[in-house]
Image (tube, helix red, strand yellow):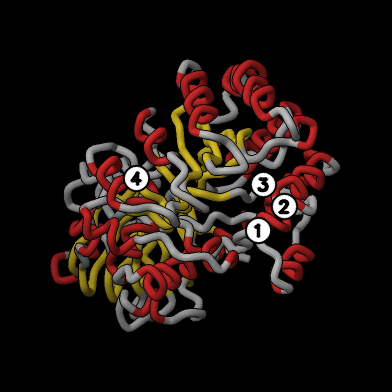
Amino acid sequence: MMDTLFINAKEILLVEKDSSVLVKKGTQMSQIDTITNGYLYIKDGLIEDYGSMDNIDISFYEGVRIEDISGRTLMPAFCDSHTHIVYAGSREKEFADKIKGLSYKEIAARGGGILNSVELLHNTSEQELYRQSMERVGEILSFGTAAVEIKSGYGLSLEDELKMLRVAKMIEESSPLTVKRSFLGAHAVPARYKDNRIEYVNEIINCMIPVIASEDLAEFVDVFTEDGFFSVEDTDRIFNAAIKYGLRPKVHANQMSISGGVEVGVKYNALSVDHLEFTGPDQFKVLKDSDTIATLLPGSTFFLEMDYAPARAMIDYGLPVALATNYNPGSSPSGDMKFMMVLASLKMKMTPEEVINAATINGAYAMGLSHTHGSISKGKIANIIVTNPIPSYMYIPYAISAPLVNRLFIEGKEVMLS
């Protein structure tokens, strides 16, 4: 690996001189330190140094590859902390049903929704599932994502959940992405347990979690805590079992109602609680004194035409907020983090500074990665976007469809983008 010196960067975004900053909360989210006309030095895949071009002696870097990026901006690559990119097929027929007026719940009741993806995945080989998923990996890399969480949850049986998590592990091993894996067996109740949800929860606890943990296929356990899916009591039981195997909780919470997911997540020190479209002051108070981050998924809110999560109120209350794509075939068929930033700005009234922090350092925190990812800081992994020419960082969420990424470097090595 050749060391690289970028020179003449128009701007370098999200410079954190204090590498101990792992998450930004409340008013901190409006703060972005930048360097104008800067340089950035990558050595052995890590950020070695950065600063103003006024303070550099280029002769010191003899033998180093020098990249003159005049007019372009450097920023940390995106950290997408909530995706379901391992899935089979697609669900565009449900999209047509949605246009005709059917709700998400009505589509699910007709055999669509998550259970549709479960059947498709069951009938797809592991190798074909990997092939399809790698196409999405190429897509999210082209959008500037370098770290991603991949959830299971379209298996709903031990065999198929293992299939999904093995594919996620294959993605980690064969792509440049940093990958975190979450076991989401409690995503929906499978057809075989249609009238006996408790028995399925028992299967998750007694059969799935021990095997997944023993094969080291997941770091997190997630539950869709929502009316019609899994109750707070179910979630409590699953988390209580999972932490005994070293799996840290996450929660799909409050997407369709105030479900109690935030409270049970914080009870078990969940790293993140995600969705939160239905969330108010009582939940803000619970989150305020915790280490749990609120992860918002505006892509699914947009696609399902629901009310957006109250991001402005959360930040004003002093909470940390992360943004993620929720890339999945049913409610958010997009892995474009820039588009999520656009939605967060327009629909949730987050400022440009806030959406940049939410998509980088706070997204890294939501995966347990912010000590190594998510900002420009000495010693951190050199996951860097070289942007197309932009007038300022405020242009990023403003220019709705303008391509952002010119080049992407992961661990200091350039990634060939599709």
Q: Amino acid at mark 4?
A: Ile
**Looking at the image, is mark 4 or mark 3 nearer the viewer?**
4
Q: How much space separates mark 3 and mark 1, taking CA atoms?
A: 21 Å
Residue at the right extreme of this rendering: 123
Name which of mark 3 and mark 2 comes first in the sequence: 3
Sequence-first tag of 3 and 1: 3
The spot of residue 110 in percent (x, y) is 79, 54
Whether residues under marks 1 and 2 lie with C-beta atoms below 8 angstroms apart, the answer is yes
| Residue 398 position (above or below residue 311) | below
Q: Residue at x 31, y 50 (%)?
A: 47
Distance (Cα) linking label 1 and label 2: 6 Å
At a point 63% along the width and 55% down the height, the residue shown is: 328
Decide which of 50, 294 is in the foreground and name it: 294
Q: Choose mark 4 or mark 2, whichever is in front.
A: 2
Amino acid type of disc 2?
Ala
Residue at 26% across / 51% down in the picture? Answer: 319
Q: Which residue is mark 1?
A: 104
Pinpoint residue 349: horizontal percent, then vertical percent: 33, 71
Which quadrant is home to the C terminus? bottom right
How far is disc 4 from disc 3 in space, using C-alphas? Answer: 24 Å
Instruction: Provide the residue designation for mark 3.
Output: 86
Q: Earlier in the sequence, mark 1 or mark 4?
A: 1
- Residue 293, which numbered label? 4
Residue 108 image label:
2
The answer to which quarter of the image holds residue 215 is: top right
Mark sitting earlier along the chain (4/3): 3
What is the spatial separation of the Cα atoms under label 4 and label 2, in whole angstroms? 29 Å
Q: Earlier in the sequence, mark 4 or mark 2?
A: 2
* Amino acid tagged 3: Val
At which x and y percent is residue 156?
Answer: 71, 34
